[in-house]
Structure formats: structure tokens, C-alpha cells
Image: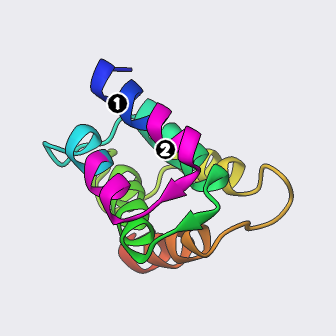
Amino acid sequence: MTRPLDDVTAMIAQARRLGPDETLALRRVVWPDGKITLGEARILFELNRSSTAPSAEWVDFFVEAITAYLVEQAEPRGYVSDENAAWLMQAIDHDGKVDTLAELELLVKVIERAEN
């Protein structure tokens, strides 16, 4: 993890808030080149779970970033591999249920965007 990402995630973890300002800060350090790593995707899920007040901006960013990671970055593009599908199911179903609106929207978006 990079120092700017450490700083932003520490700030968010302390505030437990994912408002427009926090989302913009994350977007700048996590997605400046439009690519998300597995480690960054995991961090986004952790932040989503720990937030008590996710904003609409956060939900949009979370869904967009994780969908890009799963559908557009991974090979073959346009598909969700068995490995990535298993990762997504584990990330969402860690406690036996879909916990947040962002997770539900993510599932819908991945199904819409992926060819298979």
C-alpha cells in the first residue's frame, strides 16, 4: 500500500464516514490511472463495510471501481473469471448476507456489464 493511500484510509477509518470529500480523495489515490489492484479492491470493500454514512458519491465510485477491476481489467475482458467470481462472492458474502446498498448495486452492475 502506498503512503497516500495509507493516509486516506486512516482518515476514513477514524471518521467512519465516506462522504464526497473522502470519496474524491480515494479516487485520486486509488484510481488516477483507471486501474484497481486486488489490494486496493480489498481496501475498498473494507472501507465500505466500516462506513456508517456512505454517500451517493461513494456508492458510485465503489461500484464503478470494483466493476472495472472485475470486468474490464481482468482477462478475458468483458467476462468475470471463476477466480474473480469466487473472490467477489467471498467479499460480499463474508457474513452470509449482502450488507450494503453499494454491494447490491455492485452485483447488479457486474451482471449487467459482464458477458458471462
* Residue 75 image position (x, y, % from top left): 32, 45
Which of the 4 image quarters holds residue 1? Answer: top left
Examine the rendered structure and indicate whether residue 58 appears above or below residue 22: below
Q: Secondary structure at mark 2?
A: helix
Main secondary-structure element of the magenta-colored stretch: helix
Q: Secondary structure at mark 1?
A: helix
Q: Residue furthest left?
A: 33
Which of the 4 image quarters holds residue 79? Answer: bottom left
Q: In this view of the protein, which residue sits in the foreground, 112 or 103? A: 103
Is 14 one of the magenta-colored residues?
A: yes
Q: Which residue is mark 2?
A: 12
Which residue does the image show at 66% across and 69% down from the upper left? 100
Examine the rendered structure and indicate whether residue 97 appears above or below residue 23: below
* Residue 26 image position (x, y, % from top left): 32, 46
Q: Is residue 78 left or right of residue 80?
A: left
Q: Which residue is mark 1?
A: 5
Q: In this view of the protein, which residue sits in the foreground, 57 or 94? A: 57
* Residue 104 image position (x, y, % from top left): 61, 75
Q: Nearer the viewer, mark 1 or mark 2?
A: 2
Chain-order first, disc 1 or disc 2: 1
Tag count in the figure?
2
Q: At label 1, which amino acid type do we have? A: Leu
Residue 109 has which mark?
none
* Residue 32 image position (x, y, % from top left): 15, 43
Is 98 one of the magenta-colored residues?
A: no
Residue interval drawn in magenta: 10-25
Which residue does the image show at 52% across and 67% down from the upper left? 54
Examine the rendered structure and indicate whether residue 49 appears above or below residue 59: above
Q: Residue furthest right?
A: 96
Q: At label 2, which amino acid type do we have? A: Ile
Q: In this view of the protein, which residue sits in the foreground, 18 or 86? A: 18
Q: Is residue 61 left or right of residue 44?
A: left
